Image (cartoon, rainbow, N blue to C red):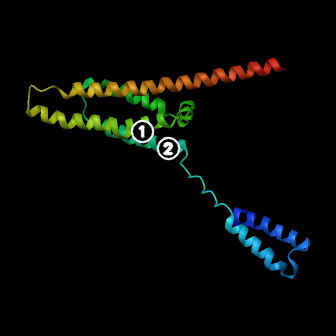
Amino acid sequence: MRYLESRKNLTGSACGLAGLALTFAGVAGPYWPVVVAGLYGAGALIAPPERPPLPDFPDPSAQLDELRGDFGRLREYLNGVELPPAAGRLTELTELLTALLDPGWVAEVLAQDPEGVHALSRAVRHDIPEAVDTFVRTRWWTRLTPGTEPPERHLELQLTLLHEEADRLAAALREVEARRQESHTRYLEDRGRSQ
């Protein structure tokens, strides 16, 4: 069935019809079946190649579902790690990430922003685990070498930077939703004027 709709068949059929027209005009003579078949074959050979199908990319909401699962595993990991009181920024950060990943209008807007999904993915799958793991490993070494800069300071700074990045993403999503709402309001006003 696919061949019937292909460019080769359509071009060959058009050339074959031209061969039939030549036959009815009396040009092809008794060899008309050879002329029609030959023109069909020539048309099929000169037809442009088929376009490759578009790649089937995963649905953005499916990516967010995977990210939610990874975030759940990250929270389990964080619950099992002993962190200092200075890591209160981690609680704020995880609450913000929970709000961004919760299903609803935020997830709908986020699904349309591949860079935002990538930023969240990078934070959940790499940045936060790396910051916490580095703190845990470094804390052990600082016990052996007193007088060095405390790893809590670096952890708090890293978490603050990650929180600021997530906060910027949340602000951008709020702005997109506000623009969408303004656009819908203008649409309704214009529709009301036209009636």
Q: Secondary structure at mark 1?
A: helix
Residue 35 at what x, y percent from top left? 80, 76
Report if residue 37 is visible in the image.
yes
Residue located 70% across and 62% down the image: 7
Q: How many marks?
A: 2
Q: Hey, which residue is sitting farthest front in the picture?
A: 27
Using a 10 Å C-alpha cutoff, classify the residue at mark 2 as few (fewer than 14 neighbours), some (14 to 19) or many (20 or more): some
* Image marks 1 and 2: residues in contact by CB distance under 8 Å: yes
Of residues 121 and 104, the one drawn nearer to the viewer in this rendering: 121
Q: Is residue 93 above or below residue 45?
A: above
Name the image quarter holding residue 193: top right
The amino acid marked with disc number 2 is Gln
Name the image quarter holding residue 79: top left
Please tell me which of labels 1 and 2 falls first in the chain: 2
Residue 85, numbered circle: none
Of residues 123 and 15, the one drawn nearer to the viewer in this rendering: 15
Q: Is residue 8 above or below residue 193?
A: below
Of residues 31 and 168, the one drawn nearer to the viewer in this rendering: 31
Report if residue 1 is visible in the image.
no
Name the image quarter holding residue 73: top left
Question: With 52 as the anchor, is 35 left or right in this view?
Answer: right
The amino acid marked with disc number 1 is Ser
Residue located 70% across and 20% down the image: 186
Residue 127 at what x, y percent from top left? 33, 36
Residue located 76% across and 20% down the image: 190
Q: Quadrant of the C terminus?
A: top right
**Label 2 sits on residue:** 63
**Label 1 sits on residue:** 121
